[in-house]
Image (tube, helix red, strand yellow):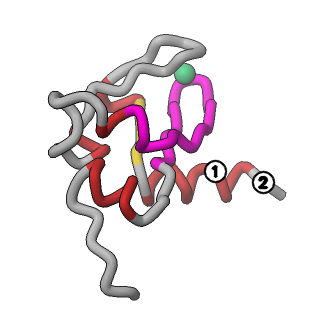
Amino acid sequence: MGSKRFDDVRDFHRHGERIAVFCLRCRRYAEVDAGPLILRPATINRHPSALPWRCSRCRATGKDILVGYDARMQSHRAVP
Ligand SMILES: [Zn+2]
């Protein structure tokens, strides 16, 4: 793999990488722009998987939300 580091939300924004999020409950998949997240002191230094995500469709939280690599795998599985 490459040498890019993705330790926190700021790294994702620096590399122009969107954050993949997948909801296990309703199977909604989204790729979130890290831009708005780095404006918030509470989220800029945290890894995306450590953020308190909530599904915008079914309101699921916690273990129902996959982030990053795991979310992408789920999205690929859904596409024929
Ligand atoms: Zn959901």
Instruction: Please report the residue visible at 30 percent of the width from the left and 59 percent of the height from the top.
Output: 11
Q: Residue 23's x, y, as percent?
A: 51, 31
Q: Secondary structure at mark 1?
A: helix
Whether 20 is drawn above or below 27: the answer is: below
Q: Residue 16's x, y, as percent?
A: 48, 60
- Taking the image as shown, residue 25 lies to the left or right of residue 37, namely right
In the picture, residue 39 is in which quadrant?
Answer: top left
In the picture, residue 26 is in which quadrant?
Answer: top right
On residue 75, which mark appears? 1
- Residues drawn in magenta: 19-36
Distance (Cα) linking label 1 and label 2: 7 Å
Residue marked by disc 2: 79
Name the quadrant of the N terminus. bottom left
For the residue pair 24 and 48, the one nearer the viewer reads as 48
Instruction: Please report the residue visible at 67 percent of the width from the left and 56 percent of the height from the top.
Output: 77
Name the quadrant of the C terminus. bottom right
Please say if the residues under marks 1 and 2 sit with CB atoms less than 8 Å apart. yes
Amino acid type, mark 1: Ser
Amino acid type, mark 2: Val
Q: Residue 18's x, y, as percent?
A: 50, 51
- Whether label 1 lies within 8 Å of ligand 1 gets the answer no
- Taking the image as shown, residue 68 lies to the left or right of residue 76, namely left
Q: Residue 25's x, y, as percent?
A: 53, 25
Q: Decide whether residue 22 is among the magenta residues.
A: yes
Whether 37 is drawn above or below 80: the answer is: above
| Quadrant location, ligand no. 1 | top right
Q: Decide whether residue 27 is among the magenta residues.
A: yes
- Taking the image as shown, residue 9 lies to the left or right of residue 24, namely left
